[in-house]
């Protein structure tokens, strides 16, 4: 959901054009994280929206693939910093995650989206990991001056040398 931050009043959305009409903003991302691709410390790629590790230790996980939706079609790179010093959940099976989603070469717009989320995994229940949190447009785009909303997704067990 896109929206301005002016005066702090909750509003649905405001495109960059002169109209104050609301607009729905959706992006679908399909990426693959290569096995063993993590690096120590916070992510430094993209616009730096995942370059955050308040407690630590942290690891950076990078995946690449494609994006579609309000931005059109293009390539996507997801940088996810997982802060292992902020584990939570019944069995400590969730961690705080900071994401930077870079969408480039899109047919309608390029985007840089930041997120604060929880990344949860419980091998006794499922082999799928789930990430959910709040997202916001990191920089102004062609379509919107600001965008905020819920973002979530999952990625599966190791398959073809990566995590879909």
Image (cartoon, helix red, strand yellow):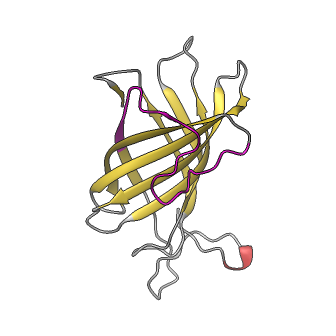
Instruction: Determine whether, in the image, residue 36 is placed left or right of residue 135.
Output: left
Q: Nearer the viewer, residue 50 or 4?
A: 50
Residue 30, x across and y down, in percent: 34, 42
Magenta part mainly helix, strand or loop? loop
Badge count: 0
Q: Nearer the viewer, residue 2 or 111?
A: 111
Residue 81: name its quadrant: top right
Question: In the displayed structure, would residue 40 be above or below residue 64?
Answer: above
**In this orientation, which residue lies closer to the viewer: 162 or 128?**
162
- Where is 96 relative to 89, above or below? below
Residue located 54% across and 71% down the image:
146
- The residue closer to the viewer here, 18 or 128, is 128
Q: Residue furthest front?
A: 40
The outermost residue toward the top is 124
Residue 78 % position (x, y) = 43, 46
Q: Which residues are magenta?
A: 30-54
Q: Residue furthest bottom?
A: 18
Q: Is residue 128 above or below residue 100?
A: above
The residue sitting at 39% across, 40% down in the picture is 63
- Residue 58: % across, % down: 62, 36
Q: Quadrant of the C terminus?
A: top left
Res. 6 image quadrant: bottom right
Image vertical order of residue 49 relative to residue 60, above or below? below
Residue at the location (47% across, 18% down)?
Answer: 127
How far across and how far down the image is residue 9, in percent? 72, 73
Q: Is residue 9 left or right of residue 80?
A: right
Say left or right for 141 vs 147. Answer: left
Relative horizontal placement of residue 88, taking residue 20 as reference (left or right):
right
- Magenta segment: does it hold 39? yes
Residue 31 inside the magenta-drawn segment:
yes
């Amino acid at each position: 959901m896109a929206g301005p931050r002016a005066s702090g009043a909750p509003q649905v959305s405001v495109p960059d054009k002169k109209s104050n009409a609301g607009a729905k903003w959706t992006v679908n991302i399909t990426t693959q994280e290569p096995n063993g691709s993590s690096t120590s410390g916070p992510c430094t790629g993209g616009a730096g929206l995942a370059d955050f590790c308040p407690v630590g230790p942290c690891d950076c996980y990078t995946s690449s693939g494609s994006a579609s939706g309000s931005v059109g079609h293009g390539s996507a790179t997801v940088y996810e910093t997982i802060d292992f010093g902020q584990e939570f959940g019944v069995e400590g099976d969730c961690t705080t995650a900071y994401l930077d989603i870079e969408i480039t070469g899109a047919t309608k717009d390029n985007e840089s989206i930041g997120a604060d989320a929880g990344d949860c995994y419980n091998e006794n229940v499922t082999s799928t990991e789930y990430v959910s949190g709040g997202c916001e447009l990191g920089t102004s785009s062609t379509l919107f001056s600001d965008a905020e909303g819920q973002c979530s997704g999952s990625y599966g067990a190791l398959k073809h040398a990566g995590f879909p």
